Each structure stands twice: as structure tokens, then as C-alpha cells.
Image (cartoon, rainbow, N blue to C red):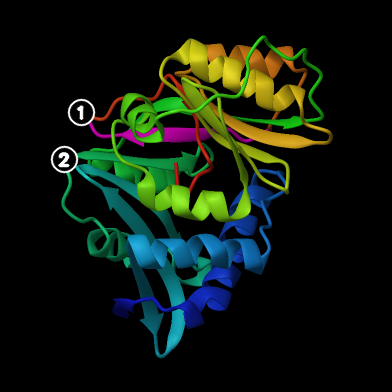
Amino acid sequence: MELRPTTDADFPAMHAIFLVATGELFRRHCFEPPTPSLEAFSSQQGHLLLTGVSCAAEDDGALIGYGTSWTRGDDWFLASLFVAPSAQGSGVGPALLDAVWGDARRRRTITDAIQPVSNVLYARRGLIPTTPVLTFTGTPGIDAPALDEADADILALDEAAYGFDRVLDHALWSQVARRTTWGDAYSYAFPSGDIGPVVGATPAAAALALAAELARATGPVRVRVFGSAPELVEVALRAQLRLGAVPGLLLCSRDAAAPSALAPSGYLLF
């Protein structure tokens, strides 16, 4: 096995590994797996290639796994780590994790709750399951709150809700989604129906922004909400959205807090 930095030419093979590895896992538990398009997958992986660390594992010239992570200030996030089923259990995963581990004090990642092997691997490195990540989908039915659009200090909101700077990631989100600022909150809505991140100075502010975003949706949406943000969970339930079958898990190091005032953009960019 050889480890090397990934390039954009690897994206199709990385996409294929993701589909096969995730498909095998989900179908083993009788769930339908996620199937992102190559275009959407490549957009996010390209952003990680530019703003994070990305490593590929090869065997005899064939890609058998990859890992990606990003660091913002003193916060590190494992965005993805996938190994082809034929190479699982041979040490590829731990080697990739070492390669993208980086140097940061606070660490997080999001995994699927049905991945016991990966979750044990991360727990042994100090990433402990902290709160569920709930996925809600459907066409919202909720009254618009009394909330008007207003200028907001995006950097201050990120510091309050995330605890670190998201300037690099706003550059990506703003290219492909509509951002609305609500004074003490902001929200992103994507053409695909995905909503997030939704970020507030307080849990109440984030919940109002999520309600406002859901109220103006004209079709099906998908929003992910941390169990540690009960105000946002209540909004999703009030909007009559359906709870997804497979929850995620937010894994954190001891000094990394679970968020209470945000709904993340997804599993890769938090």
C-alpha cells in the first residue's frame, strides 16, 4: 500500500469507493444508501483539496481508500474516510487517519451510527460519540415567524456558534446557495432543497432563522440538526418534517463542545 496526496483526477475513483463502501454498509442493515452525484461529490472534495488535507491509498496503482480533513484555527474536522470493501480490515483506515490527523487541540467528526468499526477506531483516538445528528426531510408546513432580513456580522456569528472562523467555507457555500442574514442569525438554502448551515448567536436565534427558512420553502427540503440543539429539533418537528431512518453521530474530543445554535451544512463541512 502507498499513501499519497489526492488530486482532482482521483475524484471519480473516490466517488466510486464512497458509493460501494456506503452502499455495502447501508444495504447490510436494509437501508437505502446515499447516492450523491459525481458533480456534487467533486465540488465538496475539490474544496477540501484546496482548504484541507486529502490523502489517497493505492495498491498496485489502484485507489483503495481516501481520507480528508480540514483545520480552521485550533479546530480539526475529519471530513471523510472510506476504504473499498475488499481492502477493509487490512490497516488502510488507520493509516489514512494518521495521514490526515493534523495538529489541532479540538477535534470532531460526523459518522453514521451504523458504523461500529469506524466509530471504535475514532473513539480509540479520543473522538467520543457526543450527540446524534438527525436528518429531517419533507415539504415543510410551518408558519413564518416574525423575523425580517437584516445585516449580520457573519464572523461574530460563526465564533459564537462554531467557535471558529468559517470564511473559507462561506466562499464555497455562497457560490452555490442563497444566504440570508437575519440580524443575529444566517441561513443557507441550496437549489437541491438542502438547508444549512443555519447559525445563530443563540439557540433561539438559530431556531427562528430555521423556521423562517422552512416557511418560505416551496418544495421538499433536507435539514440536519444536532440532538444538542433541541430548539432546532423542535422547529423541524413543528414543520412536520420526517425523521430519517439512519441517524448520524457527532464525535468530539474532550474539549470540543457539541453545538447548540446551529444546523450543519452536512457531514463533510460541518
Q: In the figure, residue 157 lies in which quadrant?
A: top left
**Furthest residue in direction front, as rendered:** 151
Identity, as a three-letter code, of the amino acid under mark 1: Asp
Q: Is residue 232 visible?
A: no
Q: Position of residue 108 (x, y in %)?
A: 33, 39
> Residue drawn 68% across and 57% down?
35
Quadrant showing the N terminus: bottom left
Where 112 falls versus 90 (above or below)?
Answer: above
Look at the numbered discs 2 and 1 and tell me whether their residues touch, using CB distance below 8 Å. yes
**CA neighbours of label 2 inside 10 A, class few (<14), some (14 to 19), many (20+):** few
Q: Which mark is residue 255?
A: 1
Side of 94 relative to 229 (left or right): left
Highlighted magenta segment, given as a residue range: 245-255
> Residue drawn 67% across and 27% down?
213
Label 2: element kind:
loop
Q: Which mark is residue 105?
A: 2
Side of 222 relative to 85 (left or right): right
